[in-house]
């Protein structure tokens, strides 16, 4: 049985590397995508249990990704990761399970992931 996977979606390579490293140290399997379209492909292939999602990205932004997930009937929890002041509102707009404002503190990110993992 494959290890439960977290999909990290962000167009900033340093954010992808940092979040991936943090999650890997904590024992999570991680896949990455640099935009919403690539993330949709990864969801179809890898079946993550959680998506950490930036909102402002080229090609397909976080809103487009969330709309397509809903259209496909996917119920994978999404955590919005954004530097925008509107993080809470944006998370609410797409029906996200949570949000983590950037720059985030590592404990806050891990607490959010663990809380969602425990249901």
Image (spheres, grey):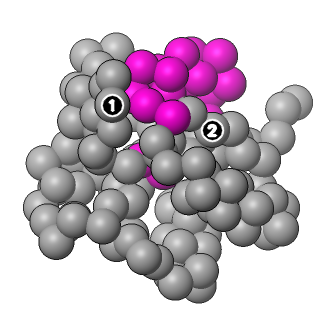
Identity of the residue drawn at 46% across and 78% down: 104
Magenta stretch: includes residue 62: no
Q: Quadrant of residue 98?
A: bottom left
Q: Quadrant of residue 80?
A: bottom left
Q: Which mark is residue 32?
A: 2
Residue 106, horizontal then vertical, whole percent: 59, 80
Q: CA distance from mark 2 to mark 1?
A: 15 Å
79 vs 10, nearest the viewer: 10
Identity of the residue drawn at 84% across and 32% down: 2
- In the rendered image, is residue 45 in sight? yes
**Precedes in sequence: disc 2 or disc 1:** 2
Magenta stretch: includes residue 38: yes
Position above or below: 111 against 7: below
Decide if residue 77 is on the left or right side of residue 33: left
Residue 94, horizontal then vertical, whole percent: 20, 43
Element under disc 1: loop
**Which residues lie in the magenta part?**
34-53
Q: Which mark is residue 58?
A: 1
């Amino acid at each position: 049985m494959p290890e439960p996977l977290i999909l990290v979606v962000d167009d900033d390579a340093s954010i992808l590397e940092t979040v991936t490293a943090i999650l890997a140290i904590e024992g999570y399997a991680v896949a990455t995508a640099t935009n919403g379209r690539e993330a949709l492909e990864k969801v179809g292939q890898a079946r993550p249990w959680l998506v950490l999602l930036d909102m402002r990205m080229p090609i397909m932004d976080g809103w487009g990704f969330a709309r397509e997930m809903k259209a496909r009937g996917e119920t994978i929890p999404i955590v919005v990761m954004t530097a925008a002041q509107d993080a809470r509102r944006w998370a609410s707009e797409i029906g996200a399970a949570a949000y983590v404002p950037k720059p985030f503190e590592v404990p806050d990110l891990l607490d959010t992931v663990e809380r969602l993992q425990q249901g």
